[in-house]
Image: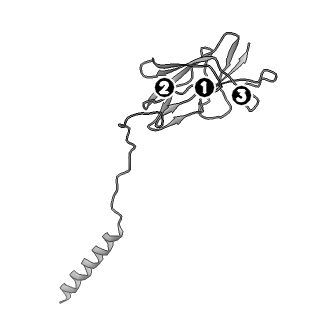
Amino acid sequence: MSRILFFISVTLFVSTFYSCVPEYVAPIKPDCEEVWNADTTMIQPAVYLDYPDNPNGIYDPADIIFSNYDVQLIDAATDEMMEQGHVPDWRGYRFAPVEPGMYYLRFMIPEGYSFVTKEIGVDMFDSDTDCDVVDQLGYTDIFEIQCHEQITDIKAIIQVD
Protein backbone atom coordinates (compact mmCIF):
# COMPACT_ATOMS: atom_id res chain seq x y z
CA MET A 1 0.00 0.00 0.00
CA SER A 2 2.79 2.39 0.81
CA ARG A 3 4.34 1.67 -2.59
CA ILE A 4 1.12 2.60 -4.33
CA LEU A 5 0.83 5.83 -2.35
CA PHE A 6 4.47 6.63 -3.10
CA PHE A 7 3.96 5.94 -6.82
CA ILE A 8 0.83 8.15 -6.90
CA SER A 9 2.67 10.93 -5.05
CA VAL A 10 5.63 10.82 -7.45
CA THR A 11 3.31 10.74 -10.46
CA LEU A 12 1.37 13.76 -9.20
CA PHE A 13 4.58 15.66 -8.45
CA VAL A 14 6.11 14.94 -11.87
CA SER A 15 2.93 15.84 -13.77
CA THR A 16 2.55 19.05 -11.73
CA PHE A 17 6.20 20.00 -12.33
CA TYR A 18 6.09 19.42 -16.09
CA SER A 19 2.81 21.24 -16.48
CA CYS A 20 4.54 24.39 -15.09
CA VAL A 21 7.53 24.24 -17.44
CA PRO A 22 6.82 26.15 -20.65
CA GLU A 23 7.29 24.34 -23.90
CA TYR A 24 10.33 25.46 -25.91
CA VAL A 25 9.39 27.64 -28.84
CA ALA A 26 12.05 28.41 -31.44
CA PRO A 27 12.63 32.14 -32.04
CA ILE A 28 10.92 33.63 -35.06
CA LYS A 29 13.36 34.51 -37.80
CA PRO A 30 12.47 37.08 -40.45
CA ASP A 31 11.61 35.58 -43.80
CA CYS A 32 14.15 37.12 -46.14
CA GLU A 33 13.31 34.81 -48.99
CA GLU A 34 10.22 36.74 -49.99
CA VAL A 35 9.93 39.08 -52.96
CA TRP A 36 11.64 42.41 -52.31
CA ASN A 37 9.66 45.58 -52.89
CA ALA A 38 9.83 49.24 -51.95
CA ASP A 39 8.08 48.59 -48.65
CA THR A 40 10.56 46.06 -47.26
CA THR A 41 14.08 47.49 -47.56
CA MET A 42 15.29 50.84 -48.76
CA ILE A 43 18.07 53.37 -48.38
CA GLN A 44 17.26 57.05 -48.75
CA PRO A 45 20.34 59.27 -48.29
CA ALA A 46 20.33 63.07 -48.29
CA VAL A 47 22.73 65.95 -48.96
CA TYR A 48 22.58 69.18 -46.96
CA LEU A 49 24.30 72.48 -47.71
CA ASP A 50 25.88 73.79 -44.52
CA TYR A 51 24.22 77.18 -44.05
CA PRO A 52 26.51 79.46 -46.11
CA ASP A 53 26.21 82.48 -43.81
CA ASN A 54 27.30 80.51 -40.76
CA PRO A 55 28.97 77.17 -41.68
CA ASN A 56 29.58 74.99 -38.63
CA GLY A 57 30.41 71.59 -40.17
CA ILE A 58 27.43 69.76 -38.67
CA TYR A 59 23.80 69.27 -39.61
CA ASP A 60 21.43 71.71 -37.95
CA PRO A 61 17.97 73.16 -38.77
CA ALA A 62 19.49 76.11 -40.67
CA ASP A 63 21.07 73.82 -43.29
CA ILE A 64 19.47 73.61 -46.71
CA ILE A 65 18.39 70.40 -48.47
CA PHE A 66 20.58 70.20 -51.56
CA SER A 67 19.65 68.89 -55.02
CA ASN A 68 21.23 68.35 -58.44
CA TYR A 69 23.73 65.65 -57.51
CA ASP A 70 24.24 61.95 -58.21
CA VAL A 71 24.46 59.15 -55.68
CA GLN A 72 25.62 55.55 -56.14
CA LEU A 73 24.86 52.42 -54.11
CA ILE A 74 27.91 50.12 -54.12
CA ASP A 75 28.13 46.50 -52.95
CA ALA A 76 30.93 46.37 -50.37
CA ALA A 77 31.79 42.71 -51.09
CA THR A 78 32.43 43.23 -54.80
CA ASP A 79 32.85 47.04 -55.11
CA GLU A 80 30.26 46.77 -57.89
CA MET A 81 27.92 49.72 -58.39
CA MET A 82 24.42 48.36 -57.85
CA GLU A 83 22.46 51.48 -58.78
CA GLN A 84 22.99 55.15 -59.53
CA GLY A 85 20.44 57.87 -59.06
CA HIS A 86 20.20 61.55 -59.89
CA VAL A 87 18.63 63.91 -57.36
CA PRO A 88 17.00 66.76 -59.30
CA ASP A 89 15.03 68.26 -56.39
CA TRP A 90 14.59 68.32 -52.60
CA ARG A 91 12.78 64.95 -52.47
CA GLY A 92 16.04 63.03 -52.78
CA TYR A 93 16.56 59.56 -54.16
CA ARG A 94 15.47 56.19 -52.78
CA PHE A 95 17.26 52.91 -53.45
CA ALA A 96 14.57 50.23 -53.22
CA PRO A 97 14.36 47.33 -53.05
CA VAL A 98 17.78 46.62 -51.53
CA GLU A 99 18.68 43.05 -50.62
CA PRO A 100 20.24 42.56 -47.18
CA GLY A 101 24.00 42.95 -47.26
CA MET A 102 26.96 45.26 -46.86
CA TYR A 103 27.05 48.48 -48.91
CA TYR A 104 28.51 51.95 -49.10
CA LEU A 105 27.41 55.10 -50.91
CA ARG A 106 29.17 57.61 -53.08
CA PHE A 107 27.80 61.13 -53.40
CA MET A 108 28.87 63.13 -56.49
CA ILE A 109 28.31 66.86 -56.13
CA PRO A 110 28.81 69.71 -58.62
CA GLU A 111 32.03 71.75 -58.79
CA GLY A 112 32.23 74.66 -56.38
CA TYR A 113 31.28 72.54 -53.37
CA SER A 114 33.26 70.27 -51.04
CA PHE A 115 32.30 67.71 -48.41
CA VAL A 116 32.49 68.26 -44.69
CA THR A 117 34.12 64.97 -43.68
CA LYS A 118 33.22 63.14 -40.51
CA GLU A 119 35.50 62.85 -37.54
CA ILE A 120 37.87 59.89 -37.61
CA GLY A 121 36.73 57.11 -35.32
CA VAL A 122 33.08 58.17 -35.28
CA ASP A 123 30.58 55.57 -36.47
CA MET A 124 28.28 56.85 -39.21
CA PHE A 125 25.20 56.09 -37.12
CA ASP A 126 26.55 57.56 -33.85
CA SER A 127 25.26 61.06 -34.40
CA ASP A 128 22.36 62.74 -36.11
CA THR A 129 24.43 65.88 -36.70
CA ASP A 130 27.69 64.71 -38.27
CA CYS A 131 28.40 64.12 -41.94
CA ASP A 132 28.66 60.47 -42.98
CA VAL A 133 31.11 61.09 -45.85
CA VAL A 134 34.69 60.00 -45.11
CA ASP A 135 36.63 61.68 -47.94
CA GLN A 136 36.44 64.35 -50.62
CA LEU A 137 35.49 61.73 -53.23
CA GLY A 138 32.13 61.42 -51.46
CA TYR A 139 32.35 57.86 -50.09
CA THR A 140 30.68 56.73 -46.87
CA ASP A 141 31.82 53.95 -44.56
CA ILE A 142 30.52 50.44 -45.17
CA PHE A 143 27.18 49.75 -43.53
CA GLU A 144 24.82 46.80 -43.31
CA ILE A 145 21.17 46.73 -44.27
CA GLN A 146 19.14 43.91 -42.81
CA CYS A 147 15.91 42.24 -43.80
CA HIS A 148 13.04 44.77 -43.95
CA GLU A 149 15.25 47.65 -42.74
CA GLN A 150 14.74 51.21 -43.98
CA ILE A 151 17.78 53.47 -43.63
CA THR A 152 17.02 57.17 -43.93
CA ASP A 153 19.71 58.78 -41.78
CA ILE A 154 22.78 58.68 -44.07
CA LYS A 155 23.72 62.23 -44.94
CA ALA A 156 26.39 64.22 -46.68
CA ILE A 157 27.04 67.78 -45.59
CA ILE A 158 28.63 70.05 -48.17
CA GLN A 159 29.93 73.59 -48.13
CA VAL A 160 30.63 76.25 -50.72
CA ASP A 161 34.31 76.37 -51.72
Give the residue drawn at x 17%, y 90%. Answer: 1
Residue assigned mark 3: 58
Q: Which is nearer the N-term, disc 1 or disc 3?
A: 3
Q: Amino acid at mark 2?
A: Tyr
Q: Position of residue 14 (x, y in %)?
A: 28, 74
**Separation (CA) of disc 3 from disc 2:** 24 Å
Residue sticking out furthest to the right: 53
Tell me: residue 34, above or below residue 25: above
Q: Quadrant of the C terminus?
A: top right
Query: Nearer the N terminus, badge 3 or badge 2?
Result: 3
In 3D space, how far apart are the residues under numbered discs 2 and 1 (Cα atoms)? 19 Å
Q: Secondary structure at mark 2?
A: strand
Of 68 and 129, nearer the camera is 68
Numbered disc in front, either 2 or 1:
1
Give the percent coordinates (x, y) of residue 61.
74, 33
Marks 1, 3: nearer the viewer? 1
At horizontal 60% and vertical 26% (from top left) the residue drawn is 92
Nearer-N-terminus badge (2/1):
1
Task: Inspect the image, locate mark 3, and give the three-letter code of the amino acid beneath it.
Answer: Ile
Q: Are marks 2 and 1 in contact (CB under 8 Å)?
A: no
* Kind of residue at badge 1: Gly
Query: What percent of the width, then of the height, locates residue 51?
Result: 77, 24
| 74 shown above or below 4 | above
Percent coordinates x, y for residue 36 in the rendering: 41, 33
Quick check: 144 left or right of 121?
left
- Cα–Cα span, label 1 and label 3: 19 Å
- Picture quadrant of residue 116: top right
Name the foreground residue: 127 vs 63: 63
Crowd band around label 2 with a 10 angstrom C-alpha radius: few (<14), some (14–19), many (20+): many
| Residue behind mark 2 | 103
Residue position for label 1 = 92
Q: Secondary structure beneath disc 1?
A: loop
